[in-house]
Amino acid sequence: MPQTPPFSAMFDSSGYNRNLYQSAEDSCGGLYYHDNNLLSGSLEALIQHLVPNVDYYPDNQIRKIAPKILQLLTEWTETFPYDFRDERMMRNLKDLAHRITSGEETYRKNVQQMIQSLIRKLAALSQYEEVLAKISSSSADRLTVLKTKPQSIQRDIITACSDPYTLAQQLTHIELERLNYIGPEEFVQAFVQKDPLDNDKSCYSERKKTRNLEAYVEWFNRLSYLVATEICMPVKKKHRARMIEYFIDVARECFNIGNFNSLMAIISGMNMSPVSRLKKTWAKVKTAKFDILEHQMDPSSNFYNYRTALRGAAQRSLTAHSSREKIVIPFFSLLIKDIYFLNEGCANRLPNGHVNFEKFWELAKQVSEFMTWKQVECPFERDRKILQYLLTVPVFSEDALYLASYESEGPENHIEKDRWKSLRSSLLGRV
């Protein structure tokens, strides 16, 4: 296939170069260049540029084109394997592969390896999604409703894992495993119903599933509710205070590891209203360490402190000598938000109708960085019992959390008292 110049020179060290398109100097067949870098062009000109012709391949033989096509297909199946969950895409791939091998037996082995590798990835994905479905079904209908007194519940997370550092490591296992199955195409599909550059609604325009991305967001929510549940569940004030201090230590170790997603989920759980209203409990907690963590994840100034810490972790990862130093797990909801606003805030096309390369290059940079982070292997030893607890233990619903909170420390005003009575009636069947 014809090669286009690299995009790296399009951007200076500060990132976005918003005056880039104003400095275009050369044009050729509807394509605009600056310093030999392709800046923009109409979709029709880009397609024409990529179509082989007599100038690209003088003898027009399949043996001339096949290596380039095979290289393209190999990179496509390795980088975006989920595209081929669509049966039509897989049929087209196999059809094109057959044409390549029928023209030249030399490529048969490479084509077979490419397709076998793709099939293995898709099979692993299906197996992972089946496991997620089982985990979800085993816990979704087992929300702990306080039909009995909380003290009848014997087990808590400290019983399952007394060491907060070990728990932070097991949380990192879950994070990296779930990140690993998120495909780059899911970021695009999360925001668009169809290809924004494609006016043909009949051509693969239905929305692809983003189940792995959504499952990861659900994990964040589960962890937040798990933290709140573990804190609200104990009857005794000193036990609740101990649980809060335990999670503060877990969160601090997550920060040290570079696991910002679990860190934020823990902080979110501790800041939920049923937990934050337990003033007598918090009075017994040494909150200095928690204040530091909250400062690091302060949302003001567009999460400036967190973004600074993330850049530090990313830099550490680049020069790492061990797998532990390579770990960078971003606060995922904020990453999604950044990509969403970049997608919504910048037009797909320039005023002249050309494709906005600057926007798509910036999107690619963010997703590519994430793809590097998600490929890190977790260096910590797995503990199946702890992982099982984290993934399947029942958690309180929001109403059950409020009821447990009111049962621990009584309502402070008429609004809370009315809600307490309503929850006791609906959840416990008591007036």
Image (tube, rainbow, N blue to C red):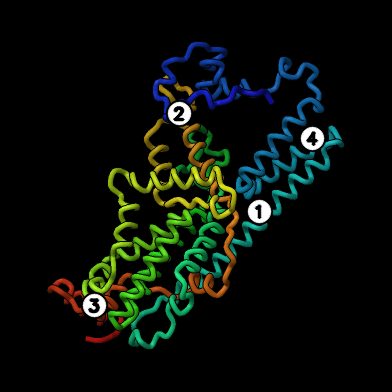
Q: Which residue is mark 4?
A: 100
Circle nearer the N terminus (1, 4): 4
Mark 1 is on which residue type?
Leu
What separation in Å lies between label 1 and label 4 (alpha carbons)? 23 Å
Residue 235: x and y, percent?
A: 30, 83
Find out whether the residues at labels 2 and 3 contact each other: C-beta distance under 8 Å: no
Name the N-terminal-most of marks 2 and 1.
2
x, y (%) of residue 159? 45, 80
Q: Which comes sooner in the sequence, label 2 or label 4? A: 2
Q: Write down the residue under mark 3.
A: 406
Q: Tell me whether the residue at label 1 lies in contact with that at label 3, contact meaning CB atoms closer than 8 angstroms.
A: no
Dot 4, how many residues are within 10 Å of its Cα: few (below 14), some (14-19), or many (20+)?
Answer: many
Q: Is residue 431 visible?
A: yes
Q: Is residue 112 left or right of residue 400?
A: right
Who's the residue at 54% across and 43% down the image? 318
Type of residue at label 4? Ile
Q: Residue at x 50, y 50 (%)?
A: 328
Q: Element under label 4?
A: helix
Residue that numbered label 2 is attached to: 13
Kind of element beneath mark 2: loop
Tell which tag, 1 or 3, sits nearer the viewer.
3
Q: Which residue is mark 1?
A: 122
Is residue 418 placed above or below 84 in the rendered structure? Answer: below
Which one is earlier in the sequence, the residue at label 2 or at label 3?
2
**Toward which corner of the image does residue 230 lie, by quadrant?**
bottom left
Label 2 and label 1: CA atoms lie apart by: 38 Å
Report the front residue among 254 and 356. Answer: 254
Q: Is 12 left or right of 120, judged from the image as shown?
A: left
> In the rendered image of this protein, does residue 29 appear above or below residue 118?
above
Upstream in sequence: badge 1 or badge 3: 1
